Every structure is written in C-alpha cells, then in structure tokens.
Image (spheres, rainbow, N blue to C red):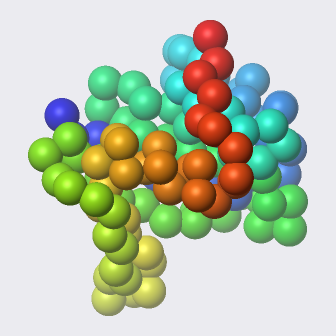
Amino acid sequence: MKRFHIALAVGDLDSSIEDYSTRLGQRPTVVVSDKYAMWRTGTLNFSINQIPDRAGQLRHVGFEDEAVQGFSSNYDTNGLEWELFSPQAQDQKIIEMYGEPVQDRV
C-alpha cells in the first residue's frame, strides 16, 4: 500500500491531536508525548511535530510505500522536501529521532 505523507508543525500537540483525530476520524497510530503524533489511514500518512514558532507550516511531504526499502529524501524544484519510506523505516526513524519507543495510542 502507498500512502501520501504530509508533515506539519503545530503549536500545541495535545490540542492538535484532538483536532486532527476528529478531522481524520481516528486516533493517532503513534504518539511521542509533547513532541510528535502520526496517523496512518487507508490513503494518508499524516504527522505533526510540536514546533510552536513554526505552527501551521508545512514541514515536508512524500510517500509511505510498503514496496520500498529504507528511507530517503530529496528536494523538489521549489525547495520542498519529499520523503520516501517504508512503514518500518519510518517507525525506526521515530525511535532514532526521539530516543523512545514508538507508542501506539488507542
């Protein structure tokens, strides 16, 4: 399965989780307290990072694709970062970035 990926900066993680959970019709797949949340829906991989001074800004886009191996990124002609990764590679990247295990949230 291939999902489009969108990553945004938010001002407050908890209120953003509530807002986007309502908009997406489900709770996040992964939450790292006070830092990060990610939803995997049937067609979308949507993540948010708590970065108050960049709240509302697009961080990057890309694709989660079960058929690819690893994690890569590059920039398009407009300077926008595009990532390509497998679900497993993204889960590992989350652990590397935040130094804690991925936590599923029900």
Determine which quarter of the picture holds residue 23. Answer: top right
Residue lying at the far left in this picture: please name it.
Answer: 67
Quadrant placement of the N terminus: top left
How many badges with numbers are in the image?
0
The residue positioned 37% from the left and 51% from the top of the image is 89
Relative to 71, is 36 above or below? above
Residue 11: x %, y % from top left = 84, 51
On screen, residue 19 versus residue 71, left or right, reads: right
Residue 105: x %, y % from top left = 64, 19
Decide if residue 89 is in sight here: yes
Quadrant placement of the C terminus: top right
Decide if residue 28 is in sight here: no
The residue positioned 57% from the left and 50% from the top of the image is 94
Residue 7: x %, y % from top left = 54, 54
Relative to 92, is 78 above or below? below
On screen, residue 34 versus residue 39, left or right, reads: right
Determine which quarter of the picture holds residue 20. Answer: top right
The residue positioned 37% from the left and 36% from the top of the image is 44
The residue positioned 50% from the left and 55% from the top of the image is 93
Residue lying at the far top in this picture: please name it.
Answer: 106
On screen, residue 29 versus residue 97, left or right, reads: left
Residue 12: x %, y % from top left = 86, 44
Relative to the observer, which residue lies in front, 65 or 97? 97
Determine which quarter of the picture holds residue 33. Answer: top right
Relative to 75, is 50 above or below? above
